[in-house]
Amino acid sequence: MLYTITFQAPGFYRKQGWKRLGEVPCDPPGTSRVFMTKELAAQTGNRVRSGNAANVA
C-alpha cells in the first residue's frame, strides 16, 4: 500500500498498475490523500498481495 496526495502523482501510480483503495481529505483545502494498492507476483509465480508478509518467500 502507498499513499500520495491528489496534486502529486496518482496518475503516475495508476499507469504503474496501482489501484485506488480510498481517499481522505487533507490540507491544503481541496486536496486529499489517495491510498493505493497493487497485487505483486512472487518469483515462484505465486500471487502475493502487497503488505502480506506471511506469503513472501
Image (cartoon, helix red, strand yellow):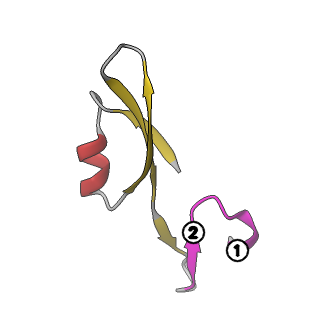
Q: Secondary structure at mark 1?
A: helix
Pick the residue in front: 20 or 44: 20
> At which x and y percent is residue 22?
45, 47
Q: Which residue is mark 1?
A: 55
> At which x and y percent is residue 12?
25, 46
Left or right: where does residue 44 sit relative to residue 20? right
Compared to residue 27, the image places residue 22 above or below, namely below
Q: Quadrant of residue 46?
A: bottom right
Left or right: where does residue 17 sit relative to residue 21? left
Instruction: Work out which quarter of the rendered image holds the C terminus and state it.
Output: bottom right
> Marks 2/1: CA distance?
8 Å
Tell me what residue is drawn at x 45 percent, y 62 percent.
38
| Residue type marked 2 | Arg
Tell me the number on the disc at residue 49: 2
Q: Quadrant of residue 42?
A: bottom right
Q: Which residues are magenta?
A: 46-55
Compared to residue 5, the image places residue 35 above or below, namely below
Q: Secondary structure at mark 2?
A: strand
Residue 42 included in the magenta stretch of the image:
no
| Residue type marked 1 | Asn
> At which x and y percent is residue 56?
68, 70
Instruction: Assess whether mark 1 and mark 2 are in contact (beta carbons under 8 angstroms).
Output: yes
How many C-alpha atoms fall within 10 Å of the one at disc 1: few (<14), some, or many (≥20)?
few
Pick the residue in front: 32 or 14: 32
Tell me what residue is drawn at x 76 percent, y 69 percent.
54
